[in-house]
Image: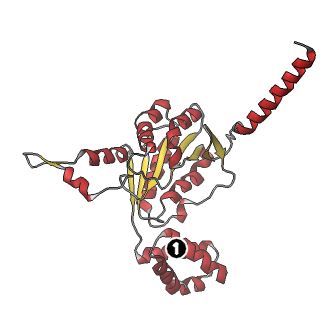
Amino acid sequence: MSDIDLTALTARAMRVLAQLEAYLPPAPPDIDWTAHAFRWRKRGARGWLDAVRHVARIAPDDLQHIGRQKDIIERNTRQFLRGKPANNVLMTGARGTGKSSLVKAMLAQYGAEGLRLIEVDKSDLGDLADIVEMVAGRPERYVVFCDDLSFEEGEAGYKALKSVLDGSVSASGDNVLIYATSNRRHLMPEYMSENLQAKHQSDGEIHPGETVEEKISLSERFGIWLSFYPFKQDDYLDIVHHWLRTLGCPEAHIAESRTEALQWALERGSRSGRVAHQFARDWSARYV
């Protein structure tokens, strides 16, 4: 082969490689281990921990009227940070009552002590084992946070989460826990027809059907269940007043906010901490 033919062949090969590179996803960026919070990102088949530059901060003292839930998750998180046995946590209940905010508050309180947060979407739960492996051996303590978690029949993420809760997390070391929030106690839809599968034993004992047992089996893998309930009217107003003070409203304007705060909640059909915070932001913008 002449030098001219070899040069032409090399040039052609370089053009083909350039075209192929245009279709290939770029390599994942290096992980910034100095960050306190991460999101699991996917590009094609590749996943990486993407550092969150601006973390939503909320202090535990900002979370009102969920004292029991706060005490339990603080105790569990402190045990986790000290290398003692700790449990995965499932938080269920009414929307806007502080479930996800409580997880963020743990990061705000204990981030300086080595706590880290990794947010994972439900669609990426199949990568949990990879995430656990990625942080294995790191000195920090990682909470994998799955927000607003629920599954429909046959979703792949259901079995992936079940597998990690049972085996992969405990097998990889003690520096990973899973904190999940959901509006469903058992993470999956429940139907009246499933009650017909229950079996009545001769001694009077009732055994749930296989479908019900399967749904319960996932939530039972969380060692701690925390339930959140809608706030009473006075509790809702307390939360409104707390946020108004935090946002700098004078006491006279706080006292005047009662009627509008109740109307705000009525229009939204919910007396929740989220609704209280939204009202306080609107009211303070008008009067501070």
Nearest to the observer: residue 278 or residue 213: 213
For the residue marked with disc 1, what is the amino acid? Ala
Residue 105, image x, y percentages: 55, 56
Q: In which quarter of the image is residue 269?
A: bottom left
Residue at figure coordinates x 43%, y 48% from the top left: 89
How dense is the environment of label 1, judged by Cα within 10 Å: few (below 14), some, or many (20 and up)? many
- In this picture the colour scheme is secondary structure
Nearest to the observer: residue 186 or residue 152: 152
Total numbered labels = 1
80 shown above or below 194: above
Residue 48, image x, y percentages: 63, 40
Residue at figure coordinates x 91%, y 13% from the top left: 2
Residue 87, image x, y percentages: 42, 43
Residue 43, image x, y percentages: 64, 42
Q: Can residue 21 be seen in this view?
A: yes
34 shown above or below 54: above
Where the N terminus falls, by quadrant?
top right
Residue at figure coordinates x 42%, y 51% from the top left: 151
Where the C terminus falls, by quadrant?
bottom right
Q: Residue furthest left?
A: 202
In this rendering, position of residue 220 left or right of residue 137? left
Q: Which residue lies furthest to the right in this view?
A: 4
In this rendering, position of residue 222 left or right of residue 27? left
In this rendering, position of residue 206 left or right of residue 258? left
Q: Is residue 244 visible?
A: no
Residue at figure coordinates x 41%, y 57% from the top left: 92
What residue sits right under mark 1 in the picture? Answer: 276
Nearest to the observer: residue 201 or residue 5: 5
> Considering the numbered disc 1 on the image, is that residue within a helix, a strand or a loop?
helix
